[in-house]
Image (tube, rainbow, N blue to C red):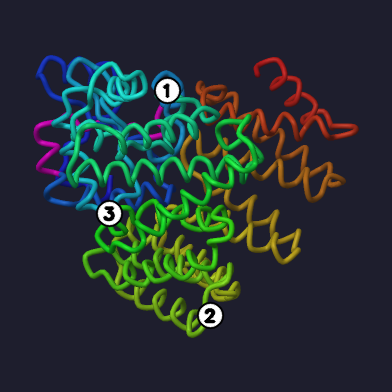
């Protein structure tokens, strides 16, 4: 694994690793990821490469579960792993202590890991006590819950539908707890942000924001109070920096959800993003993400003065200075998004094209090139890039995902091209038959999507029909 050469990662038999951890009395640190995944590459470059992270791992058992490894998707289903990357700390006896957020910068990730290692209770135990009021939580427990990776929870602590209400109750409990001091105040602020992100996300996807029986007046009051809390965080440079990961990744949704306060929040979040972008303690990738956030503020009402030039300049400077494969992979991915946000799609495509020859996962960037061609209405180029990406993809789960993406795209964009559909269906059937994990976890989700697309074919050919029947019988 690049970015972690100083760490003696275990891989292969996870059950044996848990036994070894128990025998040695060491916690187990699980990394679930894939070589092509930009956030995984960011974690490798910004966290796993740190000497203080390697030092922590000497007292733990670090285990790397590659999504393409044999049996990995079945293990993922067993341990509720889906999103790449997922980072979990287990106690020596195999209990899950917590899931750690991959979006934190290196220094804050180390601090979060130390909190988890010092915790007397698991996140599940602390959450249960907080919601049921069975005992008072100490500041370590509140910090553990505030630094939990709710994005990768996968129903371990709460279902996606329950999450907005659970987080709102948790944030309120922290705010009114008897535990006082700066640590708990910081935890309460972060938990409120988590609750707002969950509520805003549910609204964006058409789901309820929590209590479906709440009146319109109550909902408006809740949104106003949330906007006030967000402004408080943004108005405190220390607090904003501590929650930079949430603000950069979810700030746009929070601002859009803020109702009448949107104009004020666009200005204050844009200012916070400028501070992040100028923070020399952050990686080039994180600073570029902050510049991209500034650009996204422009699209919802922020000042456009000099922003396009700033995006272009930041991208050029960051790419010139970065040679590490993992860091560069995630940096290019962020740069492409920033250039698109700035209205520079030609530059984004040129960057992707230039990166293909040297990238360790060029097939990932081929998907981006396919998406770019699709946006400009070039069906031929779209399908060609998807096909090339599948041909170049490495790893059983990755090939299944890329092949499914290609075939579903052919059905969507060129359903009359039966020879192409037939050829893809025949080849993909081979990939599925050769993959013992084909109907597990992430693979299963991909095949469910494919089955629904194949069902749209009026008169499927023999290979497409056979694949559809196989999937229907297995799913």
Residue drawn where x is 60% and y is 27% of the image: 432
| 75 and 137: which is toward the camera | 137
In the picture, the disc for residue 471 is none
Which region of the structure is painted magenta? 54-70
Residue drawn where x is 79% and y is 50% of the image: 413
Q: Is residue 260 above or below residue 181?
A: below
Residue at which label 2 appears:
304
Q: Are marks 2 and 1 in contact (CB under 8 Å)?
A: no
Residue 53 sits inside the magenta stretch:
no
Tell me the quarter of the picture where residue 375 sits: bottom right
Q: Secondary structure at mark 1?
A: loop
- Answer with mark 3 or mark 1, whichever residue precedes in sequence: 1
- Answer with mark 2 or mark 1, whichever residue precedes in sequence: 1
Question: Which dot, 3 or 1, sits closer to the camera?
Answer: 3
Residue at which label 3 appears:
242
Question: Which dot, 2 or 1, sits closer to the camera?
Answer: 2
In the rendered view, does 305 fall on the left or right side of 448? left
Residue 65 sits inside the magenta stretch:
yes
Residue drawn where x is 37% and y is 35% of the image: 172
In the rendered view, does 321 fall on the left or right side of 302? left
| 98 and 180: which is toward the camera | 180
Q: Position of residue 9 (x, y in %)?
A: 21, 35
- Disc 3 from disc 2: Cα separation: 27 Å
Residue at which label 1 appears:
71
- Disc 2 from disc 1: Cα separation: 50 Å
Q: Secondary structure at mark 3?
A: helix
Query: Callout 3 environment at 10 Å: few (<14), some (14 to 19), or many (20+)?
Result: some
Query: Callout 1 environment at 10 Å: few (<14), some (14 to 19), or many (20+)?
Result: some
């Amino acid at each position: 694994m690049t970015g972690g050469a100083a760490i003696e990662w275990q891989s292969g038999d996870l059950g044996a690793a848990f036994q070894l951890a128990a025998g040695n009395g060491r916690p187990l640190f699980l990394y679930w990821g894939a070589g092509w995944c930009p956030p995984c590459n960011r974690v490798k470059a910004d966290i796993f490469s740190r000497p203080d992270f390697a030092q922590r791992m000497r007292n733990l058992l670090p285990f790397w579960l590659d999504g393409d490894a044999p049996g990995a998707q079945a293990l993922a289903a067993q341990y509720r792993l889906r999103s790449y990357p997922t980072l979990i700390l287990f106690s020596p006896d195999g209990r899950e202590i917590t899931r750690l957020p991959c979006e934190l910068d290196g220094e804050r990730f180390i601090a979060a890991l130390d909190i988890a290692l010092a915790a007397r209770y698991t996140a599940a135990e602390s959450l249960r006590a907080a919601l049921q009021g069975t005992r008072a939580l100490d500041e370590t427990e509140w910090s553990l819950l505030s630094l939990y990776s709710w994005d990768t929870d996968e129903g371990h602590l709460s279902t996606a539908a329950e999450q907005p209400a659970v987080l709102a109750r948790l944030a309120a409990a922290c705010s009114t707890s008897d535990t006082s001091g700066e640590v708990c105040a910081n935890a309460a602020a972060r938990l409120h942000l988590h609750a707002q992100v969950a509520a805003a996300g549910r609204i964006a996807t058409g789901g309820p924001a929590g209590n479906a029986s709440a009146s319109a007046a109550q909902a408006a009051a809740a949104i106003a109070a949330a906007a006030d809390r967000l402004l408080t965080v943004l108005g405190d440079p220390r607090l904003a920096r501590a929650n930079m990961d949430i603000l950069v990744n979810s700030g746009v949704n929070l601002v859009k959800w803020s109702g009448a306060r949107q104009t004020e929040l666009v200005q204050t979040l844009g200012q916070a993003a400028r501070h992040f972008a100028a923070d020399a303690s952050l990686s080039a990738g994180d600073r570029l993400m902050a510049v991209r956030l500034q650009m996204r503020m422009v699209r919802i009402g922020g000042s456009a003065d000099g922003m396009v030039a700033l995006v272009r300049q930041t991208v050029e400077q960051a790419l010139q200075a970065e040679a590490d494969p993992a860091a560069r992979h995630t940096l290019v991915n962020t740069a492409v998004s920033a250039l698109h946000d700035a209205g520079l799609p030609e530059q984004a495509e040129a960057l992707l094209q230039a990166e293909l020859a040297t990238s360790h996962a060029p097939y990932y960037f081929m998907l981006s090139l396919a998406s770019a061609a699709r946006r400009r209405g070039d069906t031929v180029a779209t399908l060609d890039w998807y096909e090339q990406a599948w041909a170049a993809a490495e790893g059983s789960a990755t090939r299944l995902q890329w092949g499914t993406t290609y075939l579903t795209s052919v059905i969507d964009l060129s359903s009359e091209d039966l020879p192409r559909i037939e050829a893809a269906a025949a080849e993909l059937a081979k990939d599925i038959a050769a993959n013992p994990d084909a109907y597990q976890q992430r693979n299963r989700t991909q095949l469910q999507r494919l089955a629904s697309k194949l069902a749209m074919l009026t008169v499927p050919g023999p290979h497409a029909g056979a694949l559809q029947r196989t999937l229907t019988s297995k799913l």
